[in-house]
Image (cartoon, helix red, strand yellow):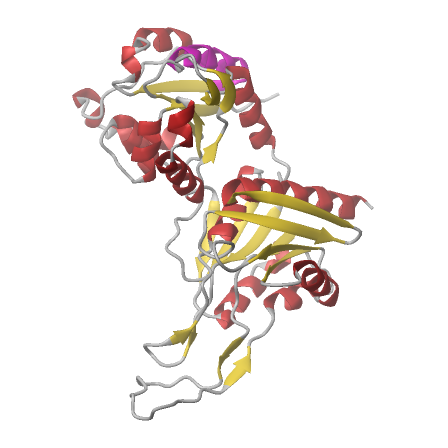
């Protein structure tokens, strides 16, 4: 019998009193079957010495970006490639800010920028620091980049205050990692569309919409963390590709349809989160249209409905649509689900500070004989809940 593959985790320890918990976390991770290597910031070494982590992990501790002995072989790059998962526990407010804004001014931030492995943070800070709008903006940025946050927990803090900001206990962190590794979508292939499309009027102008792609990218990241193979067909978006996701970039509705048709045969689940243009110019000018007349009319024609096309296949995947509405949300969402023969519809309000290009959202999810409200929260957390719901309904349908 072959030996089980040992999972490799890089544990980053940043400055804070919760660093003492990280010593126990190393032991708990090794008990769970992980090989652990530790990287410490300068501030972390003020709380716990590197020798403690070296003794507990059985590996040298990494502390310096410009270590001559390591850099001769590009040590920081090798360490970034070595890890299956990068876990930062505790993650201080300072570290979250630097990582959110792409700093690479020490070994740990450099490793995070250089790795393709999933990054997980266990925040730890004073309750007011956690609640500060700057920290919450950084949280939203990190989650938008596909970084997973565990906690923080709530309770008594070393400063004597009580509230949200405690680092989760080591056993809670290990349990969360293990739950994510097993994954509710393990062994499944998820095909997903996200972002807007652009329908050209001429070589300069196009018809599009306000979709940022944030919700679709968050769902792709959550599905990958849930163990699925994820193929993301993305309209124009500057968002980074989530860890573990295969990305195909397209521009128009026609290109998105072709990309979906080329991949849908092998998909178990299709999630149509893209805001696809309903109409495109009937003719595209080959040269820039000059401003001659006071008014201009453009004839439009319907684009092919990608979601309806997939759902109408002889053997369709489990098909999930999105609906963005300004009024009568439930009625329009249910009508869309029945009319297009979808397995599920996730609907949200748009307008004002809700929906497009925001970091938070709320969803009303409908399926045959069921409905669930997912309250307003970060799109990353919302995506986690939606993916769990999709997995639950997928399993029910396929076990019937």
- Residue 292's spot in the image, x, y percent? 29, 92
Q: Main secondary structure of the magenta part?
A: helix
Looking at the image, is 362 positioned above or below residue 97?
below
* Residue 373 makes an appearance in the image: yes
Residue for point 52% across, 52% down: 216
Residue for point 57% across, 38% down: 227
Relative to the observer, which residue lies in front, 257 or 200?
200
Q: Residue furthest bottom?
A: 293
User: Is 106 placed left or right of 138 in the picture?
Assistant: left
- Residue 295's spot in the image, x, y percent? 38, 90
Region rendered in magenta: 19-34
* Residue 124 makes an appearance in the image: no
Residue for point 37% across, 6% down: 55
Looking at the image, is 203 positioned above or below residue 44?
below
- Residue 322's spot in the image, x, y percent? 60, 58
Quadrant housing the N terminus? top right
């Amino acid at each position: 019998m072959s030996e089980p593959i040992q999972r490799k985790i890089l544990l980053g320890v940043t400055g804070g009193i919760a660093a003492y918990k990280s010593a126990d976390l190393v032991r708990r991770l090794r008990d769970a079957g992980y090989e652990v290597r530790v990287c410490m910031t300068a501030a972390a070494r003020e709380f716990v010495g590197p020798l403690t982590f070296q003794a507990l992990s059985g590996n040298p501790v990494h502390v310096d970006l410009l270590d001559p002995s390591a850099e001769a072989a590009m040590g920081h790059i090798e360490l970034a490639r070595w890890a299956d998962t990068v876990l930062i526990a505790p993650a201080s407010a300072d570290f979250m800010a630097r990582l959110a804004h792409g700093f690479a001014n020490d070994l740990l931030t450099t490793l995070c920028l250089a790795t393709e492995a999933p990054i997980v943070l266990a925040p730890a800070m004073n309750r007011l620091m956690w609640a500060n709008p700057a920290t919450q903006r950084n949280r939203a940025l990190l989650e938008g980049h596909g970084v997973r946050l565990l906690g923080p927990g709530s309770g008594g803090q070393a400063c004597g205050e009580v509230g949200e900001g405690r680092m989760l206990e080591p056993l809670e962190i290990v349990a969360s990692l293990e739950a994510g590794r097993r994954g509710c979508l393990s062994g499944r292939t998820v095909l997903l569309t996200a972002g807007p499309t652009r329908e050209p009027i001429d070589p300069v102008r196009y018809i599009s919409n306000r979709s940022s792609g944030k919700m679709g990218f968050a769902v792709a990241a959550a599905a990958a963390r849930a163990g699925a193979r994820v193929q993301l067909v993305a309209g124009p978006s500057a968002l980074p590709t989530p860890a573990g996701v295969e990305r195909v970039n397209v521009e128009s509705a026609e290109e998105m349809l072709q990309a979906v048709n080329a991949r849908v045969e092998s998909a178990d689940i299709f999630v149509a989160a893209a805001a696809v243009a309903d109409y495109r110019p009937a003719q595209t000018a080959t040269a820039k249209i000059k401003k001659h007349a006071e008014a201009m009319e453009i004839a439009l024609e319907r684009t092919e409905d990608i979601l309806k096309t997939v759902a109408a296949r002889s053997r369709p995947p489990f098909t999930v649509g999105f609906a963005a509405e300004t009024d009568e949300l439930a009625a329009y969402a249910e009508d869309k689900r029945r009319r297009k023969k979808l397995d599920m519809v996730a609907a949200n309000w748009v307008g004002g500070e809700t929906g497009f290009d925001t970091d938070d959202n709320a969803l009303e999810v409908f399926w045959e004989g069921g409905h669930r409200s997912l309250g307003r929260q970060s799109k990353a957390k919302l995506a986690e809940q939606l993916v769990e719901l999709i997995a639950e309904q997928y399993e029910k349908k396929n076990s019937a």
